[in-house]
Amino acid sequence: MAVARTYEKYPFDGEPFKESGRTYIYIIMPKGKKKVRWYSDAERARMDKAAGLEPEEKDIMNFNARHAFGFDDDGYIYIYAGDKDEIDKWAEENHECTRRNLTFGIYTPSRLPIQNLPSNIKAIKLTWESVAADGDKMKPHEEVMKIVNNLTAITIESKSIFQGIKDAWIVRTVTIKNNKKMDSIYGEKHVHTMVDADENVYVWDTGSKDIPAGTTVNMKMRVKDHKVIKGVNTTLVYYCKIM
């Protein structure tokens, strides 16, 4: 899959998406973001042939990655470690200084100042030397992803312990730490991540309630399961009732 050859030197912003039966992707150009077509390999080959262009090499890293991804003369970008949902939320609210692609996730080119970074998200400098291949080309996507994952892998120190036993009812005063809207086969639902005064973590997904993050409630809930999620002992709950 690829964009037209004219746009190959520009970094992607987000993932391909469907619109009116066609596939598009946003790219970052010098004057801002632009929506362009995202073609299958066969479509792209037909376009090149019609234009009298020779078939390109299949190496997807065959472009000036140092410039395209914003390493430039300074020789680095910033990648981020922390809770993925919180990073996504921060990036959405501060899109002027953030970019996104499949290799780095959320990142900031060296030319842009980081804005409003919360204390629970860590900015990590990724140097061009660590990902460079030959000249201005970058190592294969899979190799770079391993480097990024190693840098952003952080050990979460959590005081959370499992609460109650499966199928038992418990009552706790909890604060909604995060409320993520998601689509399911049953329609829209909200996944509430909650924490009590002892820093125990609970997760409740429901299609009937939408409680804003930051809200504190006294809640009766039934224990559905116990799971370790991102290194945190998490109590999954359902049949929750605000008291």
Image (cartoon, rainbow, N blue to C red):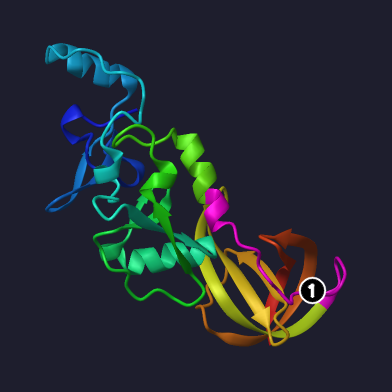
Q: Nearer the viewer, residue 5 or 114?
A: 114
Determine whether, in the image, residue 183 is placed left or right of residue 62: right
Residue 102 seen in this snapshot:
no
Residue 161: in magenta span? yes
State the image coordinates of residue 25 (x, y, percent, origin top left): 28, 41
Determine whether, in the image, residue 68 is placed left or right of residue 1: left
Quadrant containing the C terminus in the rendered view: bottom right
Residue 93: in magenta span? no
State the image coordinates of residue 235 (x, y, percent, origin top left): 75, 68
Q: Amino acid at mark 1?
A: Ile
State the image coordinates of residue 104 (x, y, percent, origin top left): 42, 49
Residue 116 in which image quadrant: bottom left
Residue 63 in which image quadrant: top left
Q: Secondary structure at mark 1?
A: loop
Q: Which residues are magenta?
A: 149-169
Q: Nearer the viewer, residue 44 or 140?
A: 140
Q: Residues within 10 Å of mark 1 (few under 14, many from 20)?
A: some
Determine whether, in the image, residue 58 is placed left or right of residue 220: left
Residue 197 seen in this snapshot:
yes
Q: Which residue is mark 1?
A: 161
Tell me which residue sits at (31%, 52%) in the image: 75
State the image coordinates of residue 139 (x, y, percent, origin top left): 42, 35
Determine whether, in the image, residue 209 is placed left or right of residue 160: left
Quadrant containing the N terminus in the rendered view: top left
Residue 18 in which image quadrant: top left
**160 to 3, vertically: above or below:** below
Tell me which residue sits at (51%, 78%) in the image: 213
Tell me which residue sits at (34%, 54%) in the image: 76
**19 to 171, vertically: above or below:** above
